[in-house]
Amino acid sequence: MNTTWPIGLGLTPESSNDEIKAAVFEYARQCGTMTFATLAADGLTPTVRAMEVHRLDELGNLYVGMSHGKGVYEEVLKNPRISAGTMQFTEGRLGFAVRINAELEEVTDPALFDRYWEQNPGTKALYRRDLTNFRLFVMKRGDGEVFDLCEDDRTVRFRFGFGGAPARPWRYEITEDCIGCGSCIDGCMKGVMTIENGRAVIDHSGCLECGRCYDACPVGAVKKA
């Protein structure tokens, strides 16, 4: 089983969903900026941009702000879902990536705007002619992941859900149809599969999700999410 864990976030195999979420959200806040993917107003075309991330309440939620005249504002009103990501490198190839998928909800609480302006005096100066031009959204509900491809090429994953949403399901699961033949283990690129009680088991924290176990199983006992 995997024994190498991401650098800097303080996570372990025993970390709870809330501990993973708190570590990721705090890391995102410290980064300040993440790359956001949205859908254009046509609902088909992907768009990408960098946006600042902030924490404005005692619950640890993440917020993003924008002008109501920008195209991204129209995009998130029509398709209020985003995917955000950032990467951290330390030395060599050591480091990790963070991904957050979330439903956005526009907020109007004056106290949140006051906190935003306190944290961002430069943005306040930029919008000083009309502060009502600015809009705030909270990442209300979603899921996220820490993915670390370590220097020794070991894969480490942590997943979490927030706002009542579950963590994203693992891509591959072993069903009761497994006959314990070991074909999937022979095919596993990362060596994170074992036979336990006559049935294959995947250590998801180290799984690359490459699909070799799915392709190798002679009886179709690997389920694809």
Image: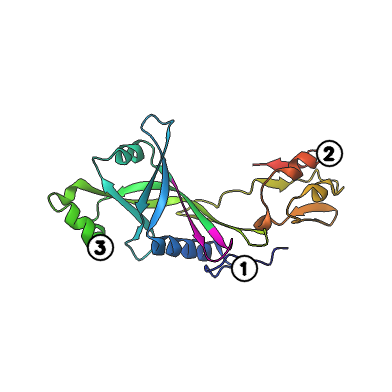
Of residue 185 and residue 50, the one placed in the foreground of this image is: 50
Q: Which residue is mark 1?
A: 14
User: Magenta residues, as a range?
Assistant: 83-96
Q: Main secondary structure of the magenta part?
A: strand
Q: Which residue is mark 2?
A: 218
Residue 150 visible in the snapshot: yes
Please tell me the numbered disc located at residue 104.
none
Work out whether mark 3 precedes mark 2 in sequence or the reverse, and give the earlier one. 3
Q: Which residue is mark 3?
A: 115
At which x and y percent is residue 225? 64, 42
Distance from Cα at disc 3 to Cα at disc 2: 58 Å
At which x and y percent is residue 3? 68, 67
Q: Quadrant of residue 82?
A: top left
Picture layout, residue 29 above or below residue 141? below
Residue sitting farthest toward the left: 129
Mark 3: amino acid: Arg
Residue 38 covered by magenta stretch: no
Residue 110 visible in the snapshot: no
At which x and y percent is residue 53? 36, 56
